[in-house]
Amino acid sequence: MPLAPRAVGGLGRRLFAGAVAAFLLTLPAYARADPQWNASLLTGVCGTGSHAYWQHTCWFNGLRSDVLFGRSQNADVGLGPYLQLTTAGFKDVRLGGGVTTLLPVHPYFPIGLSAGGYARHSADGWEPGFSGWLFVGSKSYNYHSSYIMTGGLLLGLNYGLGRTRERTIVIAAQIDGLLLALPFVIGYEWLHGPPSADN
C-alpha cells in the first residue's frame, strides 16, 4: 500500500534531519585540519520522468560548492557539506544540499559520495526530494591554499517526493570555477600590460 504524500514528506524531513545531525556529531573529529572549499560549474545531460526514469532527455546545468574537513594530505578522507543550484532543461530550479564524503582510492583521483535533499520549483510549484551523487575525478589536497581545484565526472540521481514524483538521472561534467575565470584573468593581464617599474 503506497504511503500518503504527507507521510512520505514527514519521513523525508526526518531522514534529512538525521543526516544533518549525524554530520554535526562527526564534525568535531574532522575540524582538526584546515577546511578546503571549491566552487564549480556543472553541465551535461539528464533524463527526467514522472513516476519513471528517463522519459525525456534534456540539458543539465548548475553550480556546486562544497567544503571538506579532516584532510591534511591526499591520502586523507574528507567530510563536509555541499550546496548546489541546478536546472534540468531550464524548466525548473533545484536548490539542494547535504553531506559529501571524499574517499582517497587514488591520491590524485579520489571518489566523492554525496547524499542529501533538494527542493524543486517548476510549474507545479515546490516539491521536495532526495538526491545522491557520485564524483570521479581530480580533487587533490592543496598545500598552499584553502581552495581545492576540482574537475571530473558527476553522476546523480534525484528522487522527488512531491505530487509529480519526478525522477532525474544526471551525467555531468564538473568544471572548476577557477578554470572558467582563467581566460578573463589572462585577457585582463594582456590588456593591462606588464607592470611598469617606478624606479
Image (tube, helix red, strand yellow):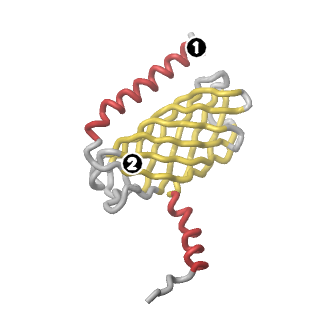
- At which x and y percent is residue 103? 34, 46
**In the rendering, at what x and y percent does residue 69 appear?**
33, 45
* Residue annotated with mark 2: 111
Task: Name which quarter of the figure residue 140 lies in.
Answer: bottom left
Q: Can you identify the residue that label 1 sits on?
A: 6
Apparent side of residue 154 relative to residue 5 in the rendered image (left or right): left
| Element on which disc 1 rests | helix
Q: Nearer the viewer, mark 2 or mark 1?
A: 1
Residue at screen point 46% across, 26% down: 16
Q: Element under label 2?
A: strand
- Residue 74's disc number: none
In the image, 152 versus 1, the foreground residue is 152
Q: Position of residue 187 (x, y in %)?
A: 59, 74
Residue at 46% over, 86% down:
198
Q: Earlier in the sequence, mark 2 or mark 1?
A: 1
Q: Is residue 71 left or right of residue 8?
A: left
Tell whether 191 sits left or right of 26. Answer: right
| 10 Å crowding of disc 1: few (<14), some (14-19), many (20+) | few
Q: Residue at x 65, y 37 (%)?
A: 48
